[in-house]
Amino acid sequence: MNKPQSFFHLHLISDATGETLLAAGRAAAAQYKDARAIEHIYPLIRTERQLRKVLEEIDETPGIVLYTVVDQELAGILDTRCASMGLPCVSVLEPVLTVFQSYLGTPAGRRVGAQHVLDADYFRRIDALNFTMEHDDGQLPADIEEADVVLIGISRTSKTPTSIYLANRGIKTANVPIVLGVPIAESIVYAKRPLVVGLVATAERISHIRQNRLMGSSVGYDSQSYVDRTVIAQELAYARQICARHGWPMIDVSRRSIEETAAAIVALRGKAR
């Protein structure tokens, strides 16, 4: 018998965008399948006045408090007030900074939003995102040689979201659809620079995703064959043949998250170098 799902409030306070904090909070909350977090996100909290307003909201909806605030005076106010309310309050970065300080022998600079500085790495990610958006769904095949990664696969194998995730890590990614009976473009076959990876899944998984898509719009699709598992199995077999013929690695995304698929691709890049 399944337990009824419970709910709790999760307050996430950051002096920057809150992306790091949100990822950490969700990773921890995901370990508790019978409890769902109601997220309260407070980004760009950099003054005592802002923090006081946040604390008022926490007082109204008590719960777990996680924060990434490098200003130690603000952090102290937060810790003290949460202690008086009897609420758990944890600095997500502080234990990590302590380890860095111990190993490097020098304290952290305590720069707010330091991970978002406009350096060369930032512009590399922006360049990768622009490239990836321009090369979505087989667009601009002529300059595919400029890509770091090319993802190929039949419809609904998560090519686009995986490409965008990789681009956020600075990896220029193009994605190209495989259509049953249509040869893969020669520009991909003869490309020297990019790593070409085939994405596949089970026919059942793809059929389910396609059915959900057709609920929104069926324009441009033969709905019967689009979701037919026999036809999908033929598409997948064709995709596998193409990858096998050219020696391109394949990743089964049936039970993988976008993050897991991207991590596998990054690992393949490391081996290919």
Image: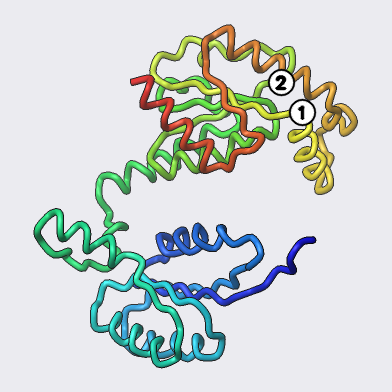
* Image position, residue 230 (x, y; %): 85, 22
Query: What residue would you read off at disc 2?
Result: 236
User: In the displayed structure, would residue 16 be above or below residue 219?
Assistant: below
Q: Residues within 10 Å of mark 2 (few under 14, many from 20)?
A: many
At x 43%, y 79%, the residue is 88
- Looking at the figure, which quarter contains the C terminus? top left
Whether residue 88 is visible: yes
User: In the displayed structure, would residue 233 be above or below residue 79?
Assistant: above
Q: Nearer the viewer, residue 144 or 115?
A: 115
Q: Nearer the viewer, residue 95 or 231?
A: 95
- Residue 203: image tag: 1
Figure quadrant of residue 20: bottom left
Q: Nearer the viewer, residue 151 or 85?
A: 85
* Image position, residue 202 (x, y; %): 72, 29
Figure quadrant of residue 48: bottom left
* Image position, residue 271 (x, y; %): 37, 22
Query: Could you tell me how far apart the alpha carbons at marks 1 and 2 are, in whole angstroms?
Result: 8 Å
Mark positioned earlier in the residue sequence (1 or 2): 1
At x 78%, y 32%, the residue is 204
Circle 2 SS class: helix
- Looking at the figure, which quarter contains the N terminus? bottom right
User: In the displayed structure, would residue 266 be above or below residue 2?
Assistant: above
Figure quadrant of residue 112: bottom left
At x 52%, y 74%, the residue is 10
Q: Residues within 10 Å of mark 1 (few under 14, many from 20)?
A: some
Q: Are marks 1 and 2 in contact (CB under 8 Å)?
A: yes
At x 60%, y 38%, the residue is 256
Circle 1 SS class: helix
The residue type indicated by label 2 comes to Leu
Whether residue 147 is visible: no
The residue type indicated by label 1 comes to Ala
